[in-house]
Amino acid sequence: DTGVSQNPRHKITKRGQNVTFRCDPISEHNRLYWYRQTLGQGPEFLTYFQNEAQLEKSRLLSDRFSAERPKGSFSTLEIQRTEQGDSAMYLCASRGFTGELFFGEGSRLTVL
Amino acid sequence: RKEVEQDPGPFNVPEGATVAFNCTYSNSASQSFFWYRQDCRKEPKLLMSVYSSGNEDGRFTAQLNRASQYISLLIRDSKLSDSATYLCVVNVGGTGANNLFFGTGTRLTVIP
């Protein structure tokens, strides 16, 4: 499968714990995005990488959130000291030269 | 004002009906436009790009009206399998920062 891959698919954690999600984009895509989505809402932009450079972070991204893309390939999104309000689907997408986004299946986070 | 606005619906239509959704955008310099389909608890998937001249893919027709700053999606002969949320995405152009904006989605239910 050469699509966007995310793991874990599901994560249940207790409030205050740290979680990390991984995204492997389509290999020839240099642009990578993270979004958060809650029920009934469209995806909310979190952050954007072009190659290894993080070019933009949303104001929604508190200092508990950090994302990396160290070698311009896979990316990680870490949430420290999770809160119940962090419960959501975290979507990764990569973007090719034609401009369309291709999404992974998402990582669903539940904070108890 | 939001970059992209959609009527959230829900739209409940009988099988075989024709249904249309609009999506308005605020940035007149917006460059490209897309419709995505999202099934419940799944990731968004590209349905079609929207070209200036309008484009059709089977039962689906997408149109762009730059003067009034909206895009539309028309679904003819609705099938039960068309039930989903339809998201519009607008590329406002520029480089170096996130330039993709999502609507909140329009929910469609096709009824037998």
Image (tube, rainbow, N blue to C red):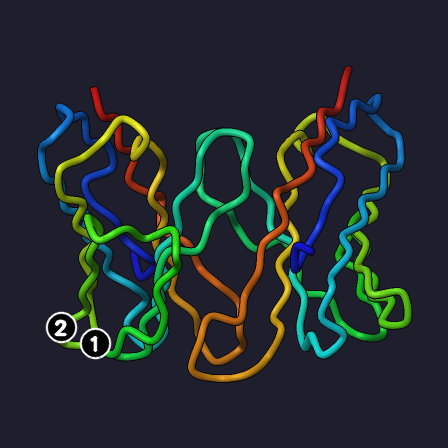
Crowding around mark 1 (Cα neighbors within 10 Å: few <14, some 14 to 19, many 20+) is: some
Q: Can you identify the residue that label 1 sits on? A: A72
**Front-lying residue, B94 or A21:** B94
Answer left or right for A13 relative to A50: left
- Locate residue A28, reporting x and y percent: 32, 77
Res A70 label: 2
**Front-lying residue, B41 or B97:** B97
Residue name at image x 52 percent, y 50 percent: B45
**What is the C-alpha distance between the residues marked 2 and 1?**
6 Å
Q: Quadrant of residue A18?
A: top left
Q: Residue furthest bottom?
A: B95
Residue name at image x 73 percent, y 26 percent: B10
Q: Residue furthest left?
A: A17
Q: Quadrant of residue B102?
A: bottom right
- Locate residue A3, reporting x and y percent: 34, 58
Decide: is B57 above or below A15. Answer: below
Mark 2 touching mark 1, by CB under 8 A?
yes
Question: In the rendered view of the protein, which quadrant contains the N terminus of chain A?
Answer: bottom left
Subunit bearing disc 2: A
